[in-house]
Amino acid sequence: MRTMTELVTAFLAFAPFSLKLLLGDILFGRLYERKPHFVARACLFFALHVAASILLYAGLQGVRFWVISNTLYYFLVFALSAILLKVLYNENISRLLSCAVGGYMMEHISTQVFVVLFYRWQETMFEGEVTWQEYGLYLALQMAIYLGILWMTDILLIRNATDVKQTPALAMRMQVLSIVTLFVVLILSSARDQYAAESLHLMRITRLFSLFCCAFLLYIRYAILEKSQMEAERAQTARIMAMERKQYEQSRENIELINIKCHDMRHKIDIWESRNNVEDREELADIRKMIDIYDRKVQTGNEVLDTLLTERSLFCEKNGIRLSCMADGAKMGFLQTGDICALFGNAIENAIEAVNKLPDPEERNISLQVKVAKGMLVISVENSYEGELTMENGLPKSIKGDDANHGFGMKSIRQVAEKYGGSISVRADELFHLTVLIPVPE
């Protein structure tokens, strides 16, 4: 019976720590790929971690120096949690290590908050006999504080975070930063605990300092990841704009070549018709109609926009899409060629992609308007669409299921608008509406 009591006591002493680590790891791993039967695997993680924590603590009791044994103990249980995360997620060890650091920091922060607020109560829990009711209240309050901190961290940092694909160099910097900070916190915390009885005020100050270090580390980690995400998006947007510019140059050459060929063909048709061969006239009329389709050049007053619209109109003609355009391109002379390609190329391409999915050809309509009103260049694109749109940061989220490689078209449009001090707005009702406003230089 005594052995059973000791096992229960040991479990109750170590289980809260393991449970808090597990919950923190799950929070920081919310974007990771989970393995099947996740709940059962989480229970296995908890059981193994509690058992290993008890064995490690018993094994380190023979170490003479408290600072060394305590630091080593918490580092080993941290490393164990990182390894056991392989039970939960299909991720590499670098990402699991990052997740484990976040989980440990959350546990450490909550512990510092609890001890600073209830230090006297914690001392009595370990110095004298306590009832099960008292111990249950003690654990409940600990978990309540921990869950509250988890909730605030989720709102302030994690909820709006994206799954950044880290470069090897960035991942290495993140791991070095995390491990070094973790070691410093563990060593200082162990030294503090050894001399905590000498000064209550100094103990509280050092705990607050430890809390600040962990919170600051979490903030720095997410600031670095956010910056990395922004840099990756800018690089991807720049690549898209370069591709649009290259496509424009190729389209311009192709259209010029087609116009030359069509011009030559028209002369030949005129010669054939002058021969007054009645039998060939109907066939020649069909050929002329085909040539007119390819020789139909859109004229807006801006050469770049003319080329883009001419090329896109050929695709629309082939796929039964009605592309109507009322554009005063002469007002766009202040926009650079690459920016015009990125702005209109992406806007029209997105509209074509949306209407091309509609089963009814009568609904495949795209409208483009470009005008100047009250000193603003107003670019409006409207098109039909089907399904529901999910908005994220004011832009429609990509429905292709790969956010890392899609969705940059709209970001590219916004980047061009903001480059000239403008803005974009998106609205969806019966139609999808994209409006770009750019100040016109005086």
Image (cartoon, helix red, strand yellow):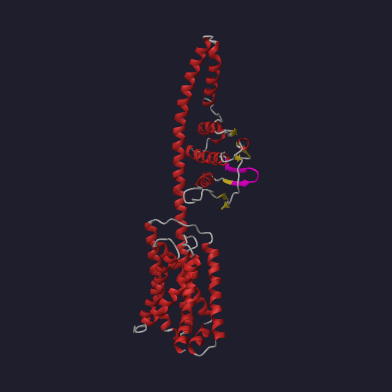
What is the span of residues highlighted in magenta in the rendered image?
425-439
- Residue at 48 percent across and 83 percent down: it is 8
The C terminus sits in image quarter: top right
Q: Residue at x 63, y 40 (%)?
A: 374
Query: Residue 441: percent from the left, percent from the top?
Result: 56, 40
Which is more toward the observer, 108 or 416? 108
Q: Principal SS element in the magenta part?
A: strand
The answer to whether residue 255 is magenta is: no
Q: Is residue 185 visible?
A: yes
Asked whether residue 378 is in view, the answer is no
Q: Is 255 situated above or below 375? A: above
Q: Is residue 237 above or below residue 53?
A: above
Which residue is found at the position 39% from the left and 56% from the top?
167
Residue 74, position as x, y percentages in the image: 40, 76
Foreground residue, 417 or 18?
Answer: 18
Residue 428 shown in magenta: yes
- On the image, the x and y values in percent for residue 289 come to 55, 22
Residue farthest along the right direction in this orientation:
430
Q: Total marks drawn?
A: 0
> Is 211 left or right of 65, judged from the image as shown?
right
| Quadrant of the image occupied by residue 141 | bottom right
Residue 268 lies, in percent from the top left, at 48, 15
User: Looking at the picture, does residue 134 appear above or below residue 298?
Assistant: below
